[in-house]
Amino acid sequence: MLLAAACLLGSGCAARTVTADRVPVAERQVRVTTTTTMITDAVHRIGGDRVQVTGLMGPGVDPHLFKASARDVKLLRDADLILYGGLGLEGKMGDLLADLAARQPTAAVTDGIPRTALLTHPGSPEPDPHVWFDVALWEDQARTIADRLSALDPQHADVYRVNLGAYLAELTALDAEVRERIAAIPPAQRLLVTSHDAFAYFGRRYGIEVAAIQGISTAAEATTADVERVAELLATRRVPAAFIETSVPRQTVDALLAATAERGFRASIGGELYTDSAGEPGTPEGTYTGMVRRNAELIASALGAPGREG
C-alpha cells in the first residue's frame, strides 16, 4: 500500500518498481545485446548457458550503414550488458552507444587490443575496425568479452574462464591453419582484391597483399578512378580472381572485371567472402571460426593454392 501511495506522488515509481523486482544477475541468465554476428557468436561461446544473447545485426547486414530501430533501442536499454565492435564500425550508432554507456554497462570488444596493433588509413578519423580478420586480435577481443561478463556476474567467473580457455585453444589452431593455407598460394598471385578495404589485418597477419576498390567504410562510394586503379593492378599482376562480399553489393567488382578485361586480361569471381557479418545461424559459416576458415579456403583455392590433401 505504501508503494501504491508513492506511485500517486511521482512518475518515478515505475522505474523503481522494475528495479526492485529485477532478479539478481547471479540467479538468472545475463541479458547481453550485441551488434555484429561475430560478437554474438563469441558471447555465446564464452557465456554458454549463463547468457541470453540478442544480436541486432543478422547475416549480410552491413554494420557501417546499420540504423537502430525503436525495437533495437529497447533491446539495448533492456540489456544487462551491451557489447559492440567500436573503432567506428557501427558508424550510425555512435551517438546512441555513447548515450547508453552513460547509463548501463556498455563496452567495445576492441577496448583490450593494444593501440599499437591497430591499423590506420589516410583520411580516416578512426583506426581500421576490421580487426576480427587477425585471429590473434580476435583472441584479445574474446578476453575482453570474458572480462566484462565476469565483472557483471562474478559468481560465475569460473564458467567464463573455462569457456574462454576452450575458445582460445580453437582460435590458436585456426590462426595456424589460415597461415598455412595462405602460404600455399604462389607468391606472384598473393593479392587479395575485394569490394571494400576489410582485409588489411588479414593481409598483415597472413602475408598477403590486399587491394580494395572502396575504403574501410562502405558509406564511401567507389569512383571510376578507384575501379581503374585496381583493374590496372589486377591485369598487371595477372591475378586470376577478385572477390565479392556477402554484405556489399557486387556491382563494383563486376565493373572491376570489365575494366580488367579491357586491359587484355580476364579475371573471374573467386567467390563470396564473409566480411562484416558471418553466415546463416546453424551453418559452419554462421560462426566466427567457420567464416574465417571458409574465407581462407576460398582465397587460397581461387588464387592458385594446391587443394588440401585428404
Image (cartoon, rainbow, N blue to C red):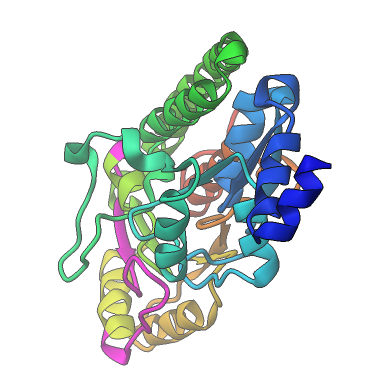
Q: Nearer the viewer, residue 118 or 233?
A: 118
In this rendering, would 255 be left or right of 212? right
Indicate the position of residue 225 as horizontal and vertical percent values: 26, 88
Indicate the position of residue 201 as horizontal and vertical percent values: 32, 46
Compared to residue 161, the image places residue 234 above or below, namely below
Instruction: Report the number of discs.
Output: 0
- Residue 253 visible, this angle: yes
Q: Which of the 4 quarters of the picture holds residue 163? A: top right
Indicate the position of residue 22 as horizontal and vertical percent values: 73, 35
Indicate the position of residue 89 as horizontal and vertical percent values: 41, 59
In this rendering, would 90 be left or right of 164? left
Q: Is residue 223 located in the magenta-colored stretch of the structure?
A: yes
**Magenta-colored segment: predominant secondary structure:** loop
- For the N terminus, give its image quadrant: top right
Bounds of the magenta segment: 205-225
In percent of the image, x 43 and y 40: which residue is there?
109
In this rendering, would 242 be left or right of 34? left
In this rendering, would 169 be left or right of 70? left
- For the C terminus, give its image quadrant: top right
Q: Nearer the viewer, residue 307 or 249?
A: 249
Q: Which of the 4 quarters of the picture holds residue 265? A: bottom left
In percent of the image, x 56 and y 38: which residue is there?
293
- Residue 241 visible, this angle: no
Q: Nearer the viewer, residue 48 or 81?
A: 81
Q: Which of the 4 quarters of the picture holds residue 74? A: bottom right
Compared to residue 143, the image places residue 305 above or below, namely below
